[in-house]
Each structure stands twice: as structure tokens, then as C-alpha cells.
């Protein structure tokens, strides 16, 4: 008996030593993750410190945005930027839009359309002339009669509805629009992760190492996209959407966040445009196609989104939904919705999906009589 106890002691010592080694290694990795976080520049305060890059360089988002003094706008595109982004030419004009240089004064006979949106309308990952905004302008000027059309792209990556409407409001009277298109996407009540508060590295109530492992597993399993920075935005496991924890939102940005603030912004936009006789269109282009491809009914969107569209229509919005056209394309080409993404883990629309959205908008404007077109004209 004594002999067996003595023989067991080396095994216990080895297990204890191994356990201590593993614990030390995990602690070291936790400290390394925290050290990297301490120097993470993917937070908005780093924009204030970042000087503009030289022209024609590869650019990150922080290279072509700048702070805005209004806390409901927060940031805007940096005027007159030239460079490359995600393998494509990027030009921001003098007015702070991803667009050709524009003349602010509207010329006689010009019908001006203003596009409000985020990275989808901006054209994340595609050329400027491949965006649905640029394509819509081309279609209108090719087929419409008696007018010259301008479609201005005021979209800014990361914007939500509150930011889009406030930035537009500040420019509204100078822009003189005849029609406004606002693009709804399913994170329009959220904030980009870089507006979150920096993580508290002094607390030991949570493990940033464990958080990293969990996020990377979600990416490997295809449940999440690669986040900006080390942490990114956490995933809501109930909805599988990337949603920032409200406790991580600085007080100054709380008025931008949440469903109620988003819907209030939609109401405010229609009030602004109605008061000036401007027509307003809400564009839906949500990536719901995979559910329809798998045999679900066409009515697969969250009830809250369907009800939002109904309320906006009752307030005076014209609702345009690109889903049917895109679904028909996927079925006829025997492909999944990922075929319309810019990359396997990035669901931003590629050039094909932009074209389908532009055709949907053109046909909707023509059918509604908003735009007078030649008889028989339609999107290609």
C-alpha cells in the first residue's frame, strides 16, 4: 500500500507540473492578447491621430474618413482622396462623395437623385462605375427623355439610418434634390465596431483570449465575417447578427443606436422631404435569398422589418425591393447567394448584384411614373 502511494507521487507531480505549465501558457497568451489590444488602432479615436496617406496608395477605411463635429454624424468621407481600396480605384470628390466631381448648383432641366446608405451603396469592393448608383444614372440618361439625370452617392461605410439622415439634413437645402433613395440594410440600427469603447484591460472578469478563440471558431464555421481589428463586434447568437453590446457604446453615441432611434430617423427624413416636395424611396436589398432557395416562402423577413416597411409606406415612402429580381437570377443561374458576394466571407454585393439593384430601381421609377422614359425602355 505504502509502495503504491510512493509510486503514485511522481505521476501526481507530473500532472501538477503539466497543469501549472498549461495555466502559465494560457496566462501568457492572455497577456499577449491584452498587449496587442493596448495598441489596437481600429477605434475611432485613432482617426484623430492618423495623417492622410500619400495619393495612390492602398487605403484602409480610416484613411478616407475624417471626424465630423456633429455627434449624430460622427464622421464623413475625407474630400479629394485618391488611392486603392480592396483592389479597386477609390476616388472621393471635393464634396466628400465617392463620385465624379459634381457641380453643386443644379442646372436647368436636371433631375437630381440623392442616394443615402452605407457600405453597400458606397460600393465596398467594387469599382465606382459598377455601383448601383452609377449604373442607375447611366440607365436613366440612356432611356429617359426630356431631362438630364444626376444620381449622387452620399453613402458612407458604416453609417446607420440616424447618421445617414442627419448628414443629409445638414446638406439638404444646398443639394436641391428631386428624389431621395435611402437604402435599408439589416444593421441600420447598429453602430460600426470602431465607435465602441476601448476594452478595459485592467479587469480580469473576462478573458479576451477566450473571446478571440470563440470569434475565430465562428469565422471558421462560416457564422461570422472577419472582424475589423482584434475584437470586432460580437455575434448575437439568437439572430446571428453582429451586434455591439449596448454597454460598450459611449454615452455620446447612444442616440444613434437602437431600433427606436432608427425608426425615428426614417420618420424625420420623410418629414424633411415632404415639407420640400421631394419624393422619397426606401430600397430593400437584404440577403434573404438563401432561405428562398431552400424552399421557404417568400415572406421570410423578420416581422419587425415587414412592419417597418408598412409604416414607412403609410408615411409616404415608395418601397422598392430588389429581392425578387435577385432571387430569379440565382435560380436561373443555379447558384447560391454567395455568388453575389465580393468574397467568400464578405457579403457586400458584387458587380452583378449592383447591376440587378440598379435595374430594379430603374424599372420601379419608370413604372411609377416618377421618371418619363421612352416607350418600351427597360433595364438591360
Image (spheres, rainbow, N blue to C red):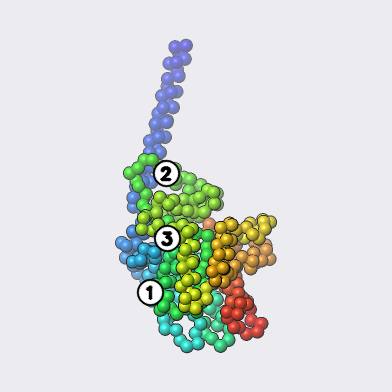
| Label 3 neighbour load within 10 Å: few <14, some 14-19, many 20+ | many
Locate residue 19, reporting x and y percent.
42, 31
Which residue is drawn at the image coordinates 35% and 66% (left, top)?
70
**Towards the viewer: 288 or 218:** 288
Please determine whether, in this image, residue 184 is positioned above or below residue 16: below
Locate residue 54, reporting x and y percent.
35, 69
Locate residue 277, reporting x and y percent.
49, 78
SS for dot 3: helix
**Towards the viewer: 234 or 338:** 234
Cβ atoms at labels 2 and 3 below 8 Å apart: no
Label 2 vs label 3, nearer the camera: 3
**Towards the viewer: 65 or 267:** 267
In this view, the residue farthest toward the top is: 1
Q: Which mark, by number, is residue 209?
A: 2
**Towards the viewer: 213 or 164:** 164
Please determine whether, in this image, residue 358 is positioned above or below residue 213: below
**If you read the primary sequence from the N terminus, does the residue marked by circle 2 or circle 1 appear first?**
1
Q: Is residue 229 visible?
A: yes
**Residue 359: quadrant of the picture:** bottom right
Please determine whether, in this image, residue 147 is positioned above or below residue 114: below
**Residue 341: quadrant of the picture:** bottom right
Cβ atoms at labels 2 and 1 below 8 Å apart: no
**If you read the primary sequence from the N terminus, does the residue marked by circle 1 or circle 3 appear first?**
1
SS for dot 1: loop
Q: Name the residue beneath numbered marker 1.
A: 80
Amino acid at each position: 500500500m505504502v509502495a503504491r502511494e510512493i509510486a503514485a507521487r511522481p505521476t501526481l507531480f507530473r500532472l501538477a507540473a503539466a497543469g501549472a505549465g498549461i495555466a502559465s501558457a494560457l496566462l501568457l497568451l492572455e497577456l499577449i492578447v491584452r498587449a496587442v489590444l493596448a495598441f489596437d488602432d481600429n477605434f475611432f479615436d485613432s482617426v484623430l491621430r492618423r495623417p492622410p496617406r500619400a495619393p495612390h496608395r492602398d487605403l484602409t477605411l480610416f484613411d478616407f474618413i475624417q471626424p465630423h463635429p456633429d455627434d449624430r454624424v460622427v464622421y464623413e468621407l475625407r474630400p479629394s482622396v485618391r488611392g486603392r481600396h480592396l483592389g479597386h480605384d477609390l476616388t472621393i470628390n471635393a464634396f466628400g462623395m465617392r463620385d465624379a466631381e459634381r457641380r453643386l448648383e443644379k442646372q436647368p432641366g436636371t433631375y437630381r437623385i440623392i442616394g443615402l446608405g452605407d457600405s453597400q451603396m458606397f460600393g465596398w469592393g467594387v469599382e465606382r462605375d459598377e455601383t448601383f448608383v452609377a449604373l442607375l444614372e447611366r440607365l436613366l440618361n440612356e432611356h429617359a427623355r426630356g431631362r438630364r439625370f444626376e444620381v449622387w452617392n452620399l453613402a458612407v461605410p458604416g453609417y446607420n439610418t440616424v447618421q445617414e439622415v442627419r448628414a443629409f439634413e445638414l446638406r439638404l437645402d444646398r443639394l436641391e434634390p428631386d428624389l431621395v433613395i435611402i437604402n435599408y440594410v439589416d444593421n441600420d440600427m447598429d453602430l460600426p465596431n470602431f465607435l465602441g469603447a476601448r476594452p478595459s484591460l485592467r479587469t480580469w472578469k473576462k478573458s479576451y483570449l477566450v473571446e478571440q478563440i470563440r470569434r475565430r471558431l465562428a469565422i471558421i464555421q462560416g457564422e461570422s465575417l472577419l472582424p475589423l481589428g482584434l475584437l470586432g463586434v460580437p455575434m448575437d447568437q439568437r439572430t446571428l447578427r453582429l451586434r455591439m453590446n449596448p454597454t460598450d457604446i459611449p454615452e455620446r453615441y447612444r442616440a444613434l443606436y437602437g431600433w427606436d432611434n432608427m425608426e425615428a430617423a426614417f420618420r424625420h427624413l420623410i418629414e424633411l422631404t415632404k415639407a420640400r416636395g421631394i419624393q422619397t424611396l426606401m430600397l430593400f436589398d437584404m440577403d434573404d435569398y438563401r432561405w428562398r432557395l431552400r424552399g421557404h416562402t417568400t415572406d421570410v423577413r423578420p416581422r419587425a422589418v415587414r412592419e417597418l416597411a408598412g409604416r414607412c409606406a403609410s408615411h409616404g415612402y415608395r418601397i422598392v425591393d430588389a429581392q425578387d429580381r435577385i432571387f430569379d437570377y440565382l435560380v436561373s443561374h443555379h447558384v447560391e447567394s454567395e455568388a453575389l458576394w465580393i468574397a467568400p466571407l464578405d457579403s457586400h454585393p458584387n458587380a452583378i448584384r449592383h447591376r440587378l439593384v440598379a435595374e430594379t430601381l430603374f424599372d420601379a421609377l419608370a413604372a411609377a411614373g416618377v421618371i418619363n422614359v421612352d416607350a418600351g425602355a427597360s433595364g438591360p
